[in-house]
Amino acid sequence: MKNIKQILLNTAYGIKAKLSIYLLFFLSVYPLFGQDVAYFLSRKPTTPSNADFKASLISHAKLFIGQAYEAGTLDGKETESLVINLNGMDCITFVEYALAMESCPDEACISSEILNMRYRNGQLTDYSSRLHYLSEWLFQLLSKGAYSQILGDSEHCFEPELSFMSTHSNFYPELKNNPAMIKAIASAEAEFNAKKIGFPYFSRASFKHADLRHGDILAFKSKTKGLDFDHVGFAIKDGNQMKLLHASLEKKQVIISKETVFDYLNRVKKYDGVVVIR
């Protein structure tokens, strides 16, 4: 016959084990204790009705400082669907979430805004309908008028020749062993290339902080053949310096850089220059 002490001890272990199971379940359903769209909406800063759009945007973008950098949150699904994951984001989804949070009062609006930014003409059909290249994403954003100007020096301009995805299909789970989808992506690349969209940019030698304003979108030009840009973020004024507010792969989270944009551009050698969108 078990003594009372042993029974109580076994009971305590059993309760502890059950609590651990319940906690793991809770965390799986409510990542980071439920920091979902509603959570961030509840933290929206109050801005005057006459506030400058870019200042308001940066205030909303700051909501995500400290959130984890996570690549591939949109990928690996059996069927393409609208994914909104505010607990983990890469550089482009961070910019999308900031823009949507600034302009939207509720979850339905945010879903609609992200759909219209992320998919070609706002139409989600399959994997190929997503704007995978930043140049096409920027072109669609500019067509809507919130940002209307691409800045660069007079000597530097490039027309993207997109081909990386269709020629490196093994890098993308949705393209592996899927000739039909590779063909669809190649078709989308060719269609955009045919538009001959020119992106003026600043080289390292020509770039200076006087070219930047608080809230500008900064797109860092790639040296890789078949790609257009490697990274994107916001210019943010910090005292007398211009810094970068971005989802940083290096720091594994959304941060305001300690270094200036000039120093960042010159330190990261894979970049070939920067496009400023205003």
Image (tube, rainbow, N blue to C red):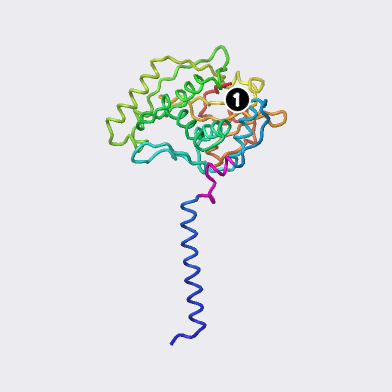
Q: Quadrant of the N terminus?
A: bottom left
For the point 38% across and 15% down, the residue is 194
Q: Quadrant of the C terminus?
A: top right
Q: Is residue 17 above or below residue 268?
A: below
* Magenta span of residues: 31-41
The quadrant holding residue 188 is: top left
Give the image location of residue 77, x and y in percent: 37, 41
- Residue 262 placement, left or right of 142: right
For the residue carrying disc 1, how many other residues have a C-alpha within 10 Å: few (<14), some (14-19), or many (20+)? many
Give the image location of residue 156, x and y in percent: 53, 15
Q: Is residue 25 magenta?
A: no
Residue sitting nearer the eye, 82 or 259: 82
Which residue, as the protein is rendered here, is positioned at the far top?
154
- Under circle 1, the secondary element is loop
For the point 64% across and 20% down, the residue is 211
The quadrant holding residue 39 is: top right
- Residue 60 placement, left or right of 271: right
Residue type beneath disc 1? Asp
For the point 54% across and 46% down, the residue is 35
Residue linked to disc 1? 216
Secondary structure mostly seen in the magenta stretch: helix
Residue sitting nearer the eye, 136 or 209: 136
Give the image location of residue 243, x and y in percent: 64, 31
Residue sitting nearer the eye, 174 or 60: 60
Which residue, as the protein is rendered here, is positioned at the far bottom?
1
Q: Is residue 34 magenta?
A: yes
Give the image location of residue 277, x and y in percent: 56, 22
